[in-house]
């Protein structure tokens, strides 16, 4: 209900406690989004070709999440690009309007994602069941690992806003080892399975979590913690870093 636009049963209502416990399933949502994206990619790759298929897969993932994380990335670009104090940064990020920094940032982010995924799959036909499975795992792993990187910030840093104005604040208020263990289990499992086909892909963890480390440190420096927008931005950037890392690994290793 919180992480996607996928309808939930009507008997399930919104509850801050539910949202708190849902943090363990954030990477699992990546399985769903990645599977949808790959399903759309497969259909359009068969009908029209790889690059058009990549574009439609990106559209599908945005529709499934309601541009949840892209919006957070845009807000972070605006906030940190235009603000010089904690109060100013938080105020800009809370504004629903998108400024120049946000618009430029999202355009460059989506372009980078499109080019990275296109390069990863360019001139490659899914000619076997094994290759089909590997490609599907790449989509799923990119979304699960990036969401793990984002939600792990909740476990190591403090929420920045002092008021309850953010819908994501309940995630930061309380969590147990179940949330931590669940997040890492769902986040890493697709990569473990993928490494069965090429173990070198385990190396993507290094650039992804190095990126996560520096982004979290940057947020800590300027706003003394993180916000929901910061988590969305981390997810988007780490997803792109995953694709770029996979390209480098397949090229040089």
Image: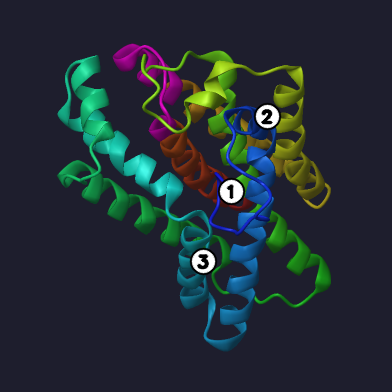
Inspect this view and state whether residue 124 appears: no
Residue 92 place in picture, x, y as percent: 21, 31
Marker disc for residue 33? none
Query: What residue is drawn where x is 72% and y is 42%?
Result: 200
Q: Is residue 223 left or right of residue 118?
A: left
| Front residue of 93 and 153 | 93
Local SS, label 2? helix
Q: Check disc 1 and report the residue beneath it.
A: 1
Q: Check disc 3 and report the residue beneath it.
A: 60
Q: Residues within 10 Å of mark 3 (few under 14, many from 20)?
A: many
In this rendering, the answer to whether 132 lies above or below 102 is below
Instruction: Specify the principal SS of the magenta part.
Output: helix
Local SS, label 1? loop
Question: Distance from label 1 to label 2 (Cα)?
Answer: 13 Å
Q: Check disc 2 and report the residue beneath it.
A: 21
Residue 40 place in picture, x, y as percent: 59, 72
| Quarter of image, res 22 | top right
Q: Is residue 119 left or right of residue 147?
A: left
| Front residue of 207 and 249 | 207
Residue 196 place in picture, x, y as percent: 84, 48
């Amino acid at each position: 209900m919180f992480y996607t636009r996928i309808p939930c049963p009507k008997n399930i209502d919104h509850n801050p406690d539910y949202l708190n416990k849902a943090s363990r399933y954030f990477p699992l949502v990546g399985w769903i989004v990645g599977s949808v994206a790959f399903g759309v990619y497969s259909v359009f790759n068969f009908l029209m070709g790889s690059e058009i298929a990549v574009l439609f897969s990106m559209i599908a993932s945005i529709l499934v999440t309601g541009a949840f994380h892209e919006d957070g990335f845009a807000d972070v670009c605006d906030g940190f690009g235009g603000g010089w104090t904690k109060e100013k940064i938080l105020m800009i990020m809370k504004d629903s309007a998108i400024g120049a920094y946000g618009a430029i940032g999202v355009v460059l982010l989506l372009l980078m994602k499109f080019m990275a995924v296109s390069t990863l799959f360019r001139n490659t036909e899914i000619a076997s069941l094994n290759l089909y499975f590997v490609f599907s795992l790449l989509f799923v792993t990119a979304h699960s690992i990036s969401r793990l990187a984002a939600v792990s910030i909740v476990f190591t840093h403090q929420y920045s806003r002092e008021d309850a104005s953010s819908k994501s604040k309940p995630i930061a208020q309380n969590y147990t080892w179940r949330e931590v263990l669940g997040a890492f289990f769902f986040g890493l499992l697709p990569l473990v399975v993928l490494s069965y086909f090429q173990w070198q892909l385990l190396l993507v963890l290094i650039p992804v979590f190095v990126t996560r480390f520096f982004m979290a440190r940057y947020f800590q420096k300027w706003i003394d913690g993180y916000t929901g927008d910061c988590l969305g931005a981390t997810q988007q950037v780490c997803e792109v870093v995953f694709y770029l890392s996979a390209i480098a690994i397949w090229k040089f290793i």
